[in-house]
Amino acid sequence: MTPAQRPHIVIIGAGFGGLYAVKQLAKADVDVLLIDRQNFHLFTPLLYQVATSGLEPGEIAYPVRGILRGMPNVCFLRGDVTGIAPDRKTVMVHTGHGTREERYDTLIVAAGSRTHYFGQEHLAHHAFGLKTLADSVILRNHILKCFETAAWTADPAARDALTTMVVVGGGPTGLETAGALRELYKYVLSREFAHQVDGLNGRVILIELRDHLLAPYPPRLREAARRQLEDMGVEVILGQSVIEAGADSVRLSDGRTIATHTLIWAAGVTASPIAALLGVPLRAGDRVPVHPTMQVIGHEDIYAVGDMAYLEDKQGEPYPMLIPVAKQQGILAARNILRRLAGQPPQPFAYTGFKDRGLMATIGRSRAVAWIFYRVQLTGFIAWLAWLVLHLITLLGFRNRLNVFVNWVWNYLTYDRSVRIILEAEPGAPAERADSVEDSEEQPGEPVGVILAR
């Protein structure tokens, strides 16, 4: 089949679902176009470590074109998807230098998820998300600047507000962020500022709406996680929500007001806005309903995978927004496309649990909880080691793995966080010198000028 006759497959999103679909199609007799608004794949589970000065941004991102090297039938287009026309089988892509219309025979939508405020969009103006690399750099800059300002603030109440950090969400991201913030203060910032100012607080508060943390975990691990957090000095508030936020305070549902300049939102995610471009009725979390074959209901030539796809398991529950699910769905979608081209029947999605190592959350230095293969429950140092190994294996790129491992060893031995750099844009510098660092599997980002000026 000549290149002009070969089926043209377009994939939106260079996250795990999109990339694993690409790998399945790389040696097939098809042409593949991968579209992403950034030129790198992002390992989102470690975003909080960038935000808390543990890792450099480049250590959790890998260039897309480097991944596609050696795949001659795959092209990459960097741009924002602004429209999808299933009737014409085209995708509209804004590249920054105009809009392109890309034709497809088959489309895979793997655009991931974004921060979910559960209808409280008014909180977004004062809250920091942790879904993109841009988010993590923004938050790192903000925290370090707050401590620098606090060091020269005479009023104790104002100083405490600057160094109080509130994290909303009792899932793994919330726990990991709260623990890392507390360690950043306890082992690094408190020592560096001690000679200049007395009584620096470094208060970290974790707020969860439910009456327990880590909802999918067994009760024993939930309690172990709470206990480990509180042993570190994190204040855990359960059964409350943030109902109002300002530049220097938040108000809880029970009427309490907490003076703080830092509100970090880790309470949940919803599907990418690209889902709405398909013109189909969306399900919970704005996810796209799909058949077990991963084909979008009503559009046999469009597949949705990963965080965007709504597919229920045998218990009637939607598959979770996890990396192993996205990988397996991306692989299945690609294989079903090839089976369809070969005149073979498609296969249904069957989640192979043995490929899913279970659930894990690190809480701090030698502190973690892990539910290995959903059978073995681990806490403390052993769970922490399991978490480290799993994340090193999943991270793309040998250089990234090596750099992250070296940083972790250094941080463990020295109690240091070496990436304490405030990046400020030069006055008048054009934002287009560099784009915001984020993955289209998440959400549209901001130019560096915005990142550095928040």
Image (cartoon, grey):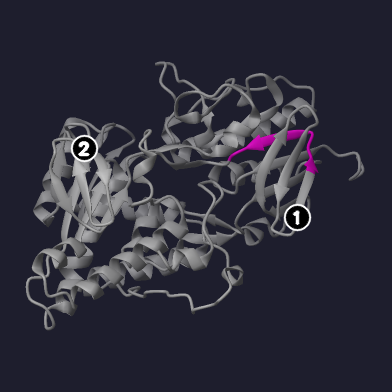
Is 108 magenta? The answer is yes
Question: Furthest-left residue in view?
Answer: 199
The image quadrant of residue 165 is bottom left
Is 398 magenta? The answer is no
Residue 153's x, y, as percent?
Answer: 16, 74
Residue labelled with disc 2: 213
Q: Mark 2 or mark 1, which is nearer to you?
A: 1
Q: Can residue 54 be seen in this view?
A: no
Q: Is residue 290 visible?
A: yes
Q: Local crowd at mark 1 within 10 Å, few (<14), some, or many (≥20)?
A: few
Name the one closer to the observer, 90 or 261. Answer: 261
Residue 33's x, y, as percent?
Answer: 74, 47
Residue 175's x, y, as percent?
Answer: 25, 48
Q: Residue 98 carries which label?
A: 1
The image quadrant of residue 237 is top left
* Left-right relation of 437 to 100: left
- Label 1 near label 2: C-beta < 8 Å? no
Name the one closer to the observer, 107 or 219. Answer: 107
User: Residue 292, relative to residue 113: is it above or below?
Assistant: above
Callout 2: SS = loop
In which quadrant of the rendered image does the C terminus lie?
Answer: bottom left
User: Residue 404, relative to residue 295: is it above or below?
Assistant: below
Q: Which mark is residue 202?
A: none
The image quadrant of residue 204 is bottom left
Which region is colored magenta?
102-110
> Which residue is depicted at the point 67% across and 53% down?
79
